[in-house]
Image (tube, rainbow, N blue to C red):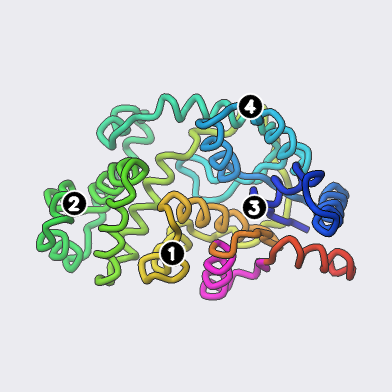
Amino acid sequence: MLIYLDWNIFNKIEYKKTLDSKEIEIYDTIENKVLQENIECPYSNAHLNDLLRGYAKSSQFIDTHLYTLNRLSNSLCLCLYWNQDKVRFHYRDTKEFFFLLLEETEMMPQSFDEYIEFLSDEIGQNYDLLKLIPLDFRLIELLNNDPLLNKMFKRSQKEPNIFSLTGDILDILLLINKDFSIYKSLRNFLSSSNKIADISKGFETAFKINALRNPAENDSIATLNNNNDTLKLDLLIQEFLKMDIQGIKKDKQFINMVDDSLHSFYAAHCDYFVTNDNICSYKAKKTFEKLSIKTTVINAEELYKLIISGVV
């Protein structure tokens, strides 16, 4: 059985001694169950992204966090790597992965143009194929007629294809992390248009550009039954983006929506997704229902009850 825990669950287990007696029983029970051999509890690069943001503020607790993640996951990693279509289950040490990801983050280019220069010839040629995919004429018309979008999507207007859209969105992603008002403007635009699918495709490509280049050289493949092996990241992003744009359980920060969609994408390859985040839970349930994903979304207390009753 595969159980995907959100970071808020890992964190509760790590600090369970600070909790009240009822919560200690809940997280003790979950921890003991996860450590059984018949339960697999993978971590993902989405968890490491959570830790990277905390590390940027303080590195004091990173070793403890990584130890907790490694211990409870047994180093089982779930990741969609660069230029790959399918999620990879493999064993990879959390500390090695984290610090390599940190190194790449620090070296990360600060614009799409810098990214293209950074890419190898082989990978660059693959992204060149995106130039052959045109944008819908209605999206082009919207970009041309809206003064704000006219400034934000300059590449897409000059060369209306998915490659240009990806470049514009990646630059916007970098700006959004510095100024949330940019995302608010983009969200308001999208709420009045029907081109979320095109935009989400661009987001997917931008996320893949940000993905780690390759697995570790010495990692080992995990042979597991993988739910939704053909699930595309852009479909899931599209649903999360659509709900956020429509004002349904809006996240306070754009990066929260990105994190929730990525965690949910990985969780969709497991039997259970356990999170105490009500916004993430709601969006994941609605998305899984729409995309016919069988993963069950529950919180920690619900998992505890399933364990006590013998269902899990």
Q: Which residue is mark 4?
A: 60
Residue 63 placed where, x, y %?
68, 28
Residue at position x 54%, y 64% in the image: 279
Secondary structure at numbered mark 3: loop
Q: Mark 2 vs mark 4: which is more N-terminal? A: 4
Please state which of the two labelled residues, at mark 1 or mark 2, is closer to the viewer: 1
Q: Measured along the vertical axis of the image, is residue 58 above or below residue 240? A: above
Disc marking residue 156: 2
For marks 2 and 4, give the CA distance.
Answer: 43 Å
For marks 1 and 4, give the CA distance.
Answer: 31 Å
For marks 2 and 3, give the CA distance.
Answer: 36 Å
Residue 10 placed where, x, y %?
71, 47
- Say whether residue 284 is magenta: yes
Horizontal arrangement in the rendering, residue 161 relative to residue 176 (left or right): left
Disc marking residue 250: 1
Q: Amino acid at mark 1?
A: Lys
